[in-house]
Image (cartoon, rainbow, N blue to C red):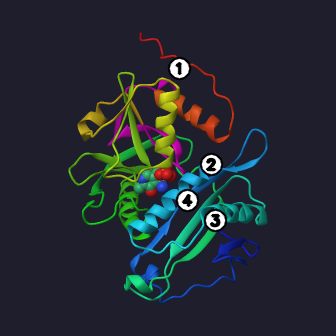
Amino acid sequence: YSYYDQNTVLYLNGEYLKAAEAKTDLYGQSLHYGYAVFEGIRAYKTIKGEVKIFKAQEHFDRFKRSCELIHMPYPFNNDELIAACYKVLELNKMEEAYIRPLAFCPPNMTLKAALETEILICAWDWAAYLGEKQLRVMTSSYQRPNPKAFAIESKTSGLYVNSILASQEAKEKGYDEALLLDINGYVAEGPGANVFFEKDGKIITPPTGNILPGITRATVIELCHELNIPLEEKLSTIEELRAADSAFFCGTAAELIGWESLDGQPFTKPWADSLGKYLQKAYKARVLEAEFKEVYKPAEVV
Ligand code: PMP
């Protein structure tokens, strides 16, 4: 898969350049040590036919906070960066796209006062990351990083080696995706998505602290409140998750995607009847700025 071609335009430090011609410094510490921060944002064509970046402000607020958490200077104005995102979409004639801002540093190594930040914004057409089907998930042998060893709420590039290892392991073992536990053995999140599950008519998700505070997670929580779905943010063991009626991942790229099974054990409730499926429809309506009037009807118990 190629993310760009000869015509693709990106934004680099205030300029719009051909992706094939843009350059970076191979001595940069971001490349060597993963000292960079990124975001993943989606643009949708709404039902009115407008191209809208979903929760752009929230994503750039997190981008700024991610940089601050690792002491990377943030000399940017978020309104200008959002305008640059729209410009990149327009220049590339993209409508439904994935947008990738990346803040990185030139080679001045670890002296905080000497740090400078560079900014890249690129975009590509990207279909749903985890696909439409339900996922066969495995509990990873990799834990999420120790929050005391790292600013875990920062979307720092280097941290994603953990995600890559977990995804690779799951795929090598014939699963679709990994679920990672936190340092204390509680359910944490996926390599690039937050986790929710349904138990006895209630939706449960891990609290913030040892996870990335997902913007999709926040949207799902908002939807639960709006739709009167009982929701609890609490730490859960893997046994509690195994005993769930249904479960799903959510994230900007993944959107909202149901689980078929965990470690080979299927969930009891068919995805089509689950609260997750109902929330998936509500989420789709939210990003497309459509009205959502459907009422949740639990399947008849026979
Ligand atoms: N957790 C991790 C580790 C992630 O990388 C992501 C994707 N950014 C998420 C959760 C979901 O976050 P969001 O909904 O903001 O995309």
**Quadrant position of residue 170:** bottom left
Label 3 sits on a secondary structure element that is helix
Q: Distance between the residues labelled 3 and 4?
A: 8 Å
Q: Which of marks 2 and 3 is in front?
A: 3
Residue nearer the viewer, 153 or 166: 153
Work out whether mark 2 precedes mark 3 in sequence or the reverse, and give the earlier one.
2
Work out whether mark 4 precedes mark 2 in sequence or the reverse, and give the earlier one.
2
| Residue segment shown in magenta | 248-274
- Residue 13 is labelled as none
Q: Mark 2 points at which residue?
A: 54
Q: How far apart are marks 3 and 1 (CA)?
A: 39 Å
Q: How far apart are marks 4 and 2 (CA)?
A: 11 Å
Q: Which of marks 3 and 1 is in front?
A: 3
Q: Mark 4 points at which residue?
A: 60
Q: How far apart are marks 1 and 2 (CA)?
A: 25 Å
> Which residue is located at x 50 percent, y 76 percent?
104
Magenta stretch contains residue 10: no
The image position of residue 4, as x and y in percent, is 68, 70
The image position of residue 67, as x and y in percent, is 45, 68
Residue 214 visible to the viewer: yes
Q: Quadrant of the N terminus?
A: bottom right
Q: Are marks 4 and 2 in contact (CB under 8 Å)?
A: no
Give the crowd class for mark 1: few <14, some 14-19, many >=20 residues within 10 Å: some
Q: Nearer the viewer, mark 4 or mark 2?
A: 4
